[in-house]
Amino acid sequence: MPLFERGLLTTPLLAALCLGLPALSGCQNRPKQPEKFVQEYRTGAYQKSYNEAIERHNTAAGTERDRAALVAGLSSHALKRPDEAQRWLTPLTDNADAEISGTAGWTLGVIAAERGDQTRAASLASDAAGKLQGDDAARSAMVAGDAYARMKRNTDARTQYERGLAAATGDSTKVIIQSRLNSLGVGTAPGPRPNDAPVPRPTARPGTYVISLGAFANRSAAERLVISSRGAALKAGQPAPMLVTTTDRKSGQPLFGVQVGEYPSRTAAQAALTRIGLKGSVLAAVR
């Protein structure tokens, strides 16, 4: 996250992942964690994620290098540096990896919409939706639909919204797109928003469970919990808690969660939560 939620190894990071874990069968058997630059991006540390991605881009090759370029572009966009974002993302729109090229095109569509070029925004986002899957495809189609709605091309907008609704897998995404359909031609067309763009995911998620320490409507509350729970997690030999952004299924509003690690089974995650000694719950990881 899929490349992106739709959440993202260097030797130093590998060492950090192994640090403090019980030496049972070796670190090589541990679930792979998100790349550091994606972890930074997902927690809103955009300058750090940009710097980490640039460093990885300069040393990696192939798909790993392209993923680093993608996160550099996404981080640039989040930092409100659209020209720089375009320089990173435009070469990726023809990438052989459909998820990389689709995500790049989706973000470029958002940038075009922010700049008022709705025709280009609709074209880029529509093409990207054809390369992506699930909620990513749905949200990219929604960006295209929004662009058409701003041009008062309601028939085309409806086509994109219905396309997105058919691709959507998450209840919150379905609610958001259905609301667009219901209001089409009635109210003001929605303006482009930064959170229309994708959020990076790890390359692979062999772990299937995470520890949730809480979820909040207020980002500051989640950030405080990340800080206050860090010591207990690290002392228990677990990964540092990190902030993740999701969407409330009922309201469709952003929800800020605090999660620890990825674990291969519910039993392993529950055992880790017990060692940490904080209140929390075990959840299936979003893929």
Image (tube, rainbow, N blue to C red):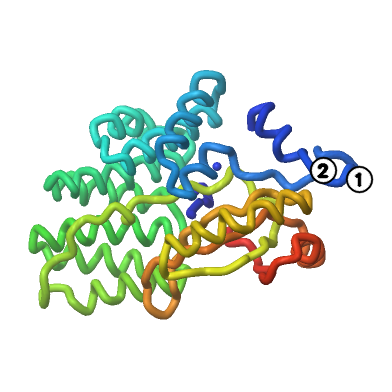
Q: Say which quadrant the C terminus sits in.
A: bottom right
Which element carries disc 2, helix, strand or loop? helix
Task: Specify the label residue 112 is tagged with.
Answer: none
Task: Specify the label residue 29 is tagged with.
Answer: 2
Q: Where in the figure is residue 34, as x and y percent of width and height?
A: 60, 44
Identity of the amino acid at label 1? Leu
Identity of the amino acid at label 2? Asn
Write down the residue under mark 1: 24
Between the C-alphas of marks 1 and 2, the distance is 9 Å
**Badge 2: residue crowd in 10 Å (few <14, some 14–19, many ≥20):** few
Residue nearest the observer in this picture, 130 or 224: 224
Circles 1, 2 touching at the beta carbon (< 8 Å): yes
Instruction: Point out the residue furthest to the left here.
Output: 152
Relative to residue 4, is residue 89 depicted above or below?
above
Relative to residue 40, is residue 259 depicted above or below?
below
Residue nearest the observer in this picture, 2 or 226: 226
Which element carries disc 1, helix, strand or loop? loop
Residue found at x 77% / y 39%: 18
